[in-house]
Amino acid sequence: MDKFSLVLVIIGAINWLLIGLFQFDVVAAVLGGSASVWSRIVYSLVGLAGLWCISLLFRRDAVHDDA
C-alpha cells in the first residue's frame, strides 16, 4: 500500500508541475476533462494516497541496520 500510494503521489506531483509550468493537466487531457467521472476518480485516489503518505512521516522503520 505504501509503494502504491507513493506512486500515485508522484503522478499527482508531476501533474501539478505540468499545470504550474505549462497550464497542462495530463489527467484531464487523458480522461476527458477535469469534470469527468474518471478524472475525479483519479484526483480522489491521488488525494487519498497523499493522506496515506502522511502516515509515512510518523512511522518508525521496522528494519534496523546495525552495521
Image (cartoon, rainbow, N blue to C red):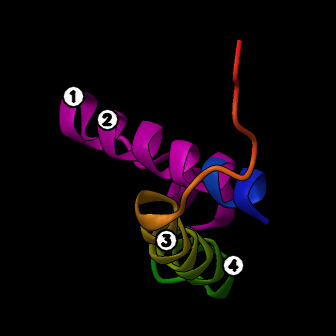
In the drawing, what numbered circle is on residue 55?
3
> Marks 4 and 3, Cα distance to the nearest angstrom?
27 Å
Few, some or many residues within 10 Å of mark 1 (<14, 14–19, 20+)? few
Report x, y in % for residue 2: 71, 59
Q: Read off the residue under disc 4.
A: 38
> Marks 4 and 2, Cα distance to the nearest angstrom?
21 Å
The first of marks 3 and 2 along the sequence is: 2
Residue 14 horizontal side relative to residue 24, left or right:
right
> Marks 1 and 3, Cα distance to the nearest angstrom?
29 Å
Q: Read off the residue under disc 2.
A: 17
> Marks 3 and 2, Cα distance to the nearest angstrom?
24 Å
Q: Amino acid at mark 4?
A: Trp
The first of marks 4 and 2 along the sequence is: 2
Residue 31's quadrant in the figure?
A: bottom right
Q: From this view, report whether residue 13 is shown above or below residue 4.
A: above
> Marks 1 and 4, Cα distance to the nearest angstrom?
24 Å
Q: Read off the residue under disc 1.
A: 21
Q: Amino acid at mark 1?
A: Leu
Residue contact at pointers 1 and 2, CB within 8 angstroms: yes
Magenta segment, which residues? 7-33
Most common secondary structure along the magenta stretch: helix
